[in-house]
Image (tube, helix red, strand yellow):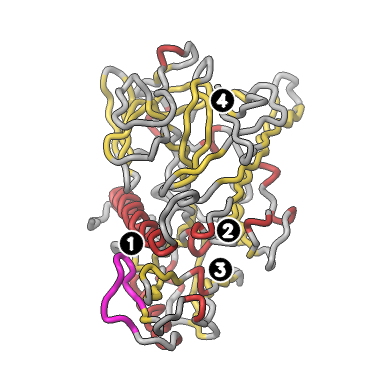
Amino acid sequence: MAYHHPHRLLLVFLAIVATATPSIAIFHFDFRFDTDGPFSGGRLSRRDMWRRAALESKARHAATSARLAKALGKPCDGTGSATAGDISAADVTVTPFTHQGHVLSVGIGTPPQASKVVLDMGSDLLWSQCSLVGPSVAQEEPVYDPSRSPTFSLLPCNSTACAEGAFTSKSCTDRRCQYENDYGVLTAGGVLATETFTFGSHHEVAVNLTFGCGKLTNGTIAGASGILGLSPGPLSLLKQLSIPKFSYCLTPFADRKTSPVMFGAMADLAKYKTTGKIQTVPLLKNPVEDLYYYVPMVGISLGTKKLDVSAESLELQADGTGGTAVDSATTLAYLVPPAFEALKQAVVEAVKLPAANKTVDDYPMCFVLPKGMTMDGVEVPQLVLHFDGGAEMMLSRDNYFQEPSPGMMCLAVVPSPFEGAPSVIGNVQQQNMHVLYDLEKRTFSYAPTQCDKL
């Protein structure tokens, strides 16, 4: 099994801490990997990348909004056990994944069969195409064959994972737990099972995980085998391995530079150089669904002007509606309609350019640039997101504007798609921001950072 790539290294360490009961050990997975951006190595121009990302952002948000609306009963448009062996400086190769995310190479089964999975913050299930359910889309690696692995085991319909899994839909056939998930730009389904997953190329690390033995039923993932979910859902790798915290620092994807992701002890903002102060806010839990990580945004400013947006309109409600979610795979930001309209009006007043009489693709608010000028020559005030407790996230021009078409500078913020949908802080807003999710302390920390320098 060859996963090695000389430019991408992931280190995994295991700390065994003795407890009062000698037979019990606590396993800590501490590792980092550096990923290429979704458009790294491609031939798209910066403008084409922005438009493509906005289109996929719309499809992704439509799918997650539909799942959220179903969970909330709203109309809408448009755990397994883990075991660990002797882990010492294991490494995992990460390679580019065109247009939709970042790919991690793993081994599935005993002996390990090579597989490439896409990292996804908006879903919890780890799944890979497998021969048991008949994969329908070509991939670069041979399709995982569970008949070649004695450690493969199907999960029954009455299993905890089947009952608690946050699927788009599920059913029980031949006592198998069948599921389907819609990711916006693709749909995948299969059966739940357990299997040994191997991380590393030189120092292999094996863990037992609940996963989906599945196939793509719609769309493509450009040669990858499946998806590795990192959402708050019950089947997430984070939950299954009790990983207490993780962080990432996204470089602008148009720069085609690597973005680091850290888990466990390596996820500590104070260990790394930042270009601004570290701020921390609570992580909120939606009482109805586990699609997103929520933060307590209470207001918005443009420059020194506080917008007329009430904290109540941004609040996460007891019925699961509203709130502000953080998503690393949604490109555009989403604001509840009152907040979006207030921002739109303030932007029109602050940006000294004529508003365009037409929009560009999925951008609802655009300005006409002077002939021969790019967005880089335009000065705009900072967009400030205010959080409960006084923390503020300061966003510069490139964190909330894009130039998806020559001569057009567009607001990378759109209104939420239905009443009750959350506002979303997308990956454009998080670029060059080191963010940390502490799942034990239930906090979200962030600091401006030159991400390609970490």
Q: In this rendering, is residue 77 above or below 381?
A: above
Q: Quadrant of residue 30?
A: top right
Q: Which mark is first along the chain, 1 or 2? A: 2
Image quadrant for the N terminus?
top right
Q: Nearer the viewer, mark 4 or mark 3?
A: 4
> Whole-percent x and y of residue 307?
46, 81
> Whole-percent x and y of residue 26?
69, 30
- Seen at 55% across and 68% down, the residue is 387
Q: In this rendering, is residue 63 above or below 415?
A: above
Q: Nearer the viewer, residue 449 or 201?
A: 201
Q: Do tag 4 and tag 1 residues touch (Cβ < 8 Å)?
A: no
- Region rendered in magenta: 355-366
Task: Say whether residue 251 is magenta.
Answer: no
**Distance from the alpha carbon under mark 4 to that under mark 1:** 47 Å
Describe the element under mark 2 as helix, strand or loop.
strand
Question: The residue under label 1 is which amino acid type?
Answer: Gly
> Is residue 351 in sight in this rendering?
yes
**Distance from the alpha carbon under mark 4 to that under mark 2:** 42 Å
Q: Quadrant of residue 207?
A: top right
Q: Which residue matches tag 2? A: 282
Describe the element under mark 1 as helix, strand or loop.
loop
> Is residue 323 in sight in this rendering?
no
Question: The residue under label 2 is which amino acid type?
Answer: Pro
Q: Which residue matches tag 1? A: 420
Q: Which mark is first along the chain, 3 or 4? A: 4
> Whole-percent x and y of residue 338?
35, 75
Residues packed near mark 1 inside 10 Å, few (<14), some (14 to 19) or many (20 plus): many
Image quadrant for the C terminus?
bottom right
Q: Which residue matches tag 3? A: 388
- Seen at 61% across and 69% down, the residue is 391
**Distance from the alpha carbon under mark 1 to that under mark 3:** 20 Å
Q: Which mark is first along the chain, 3 or 1? A: 3
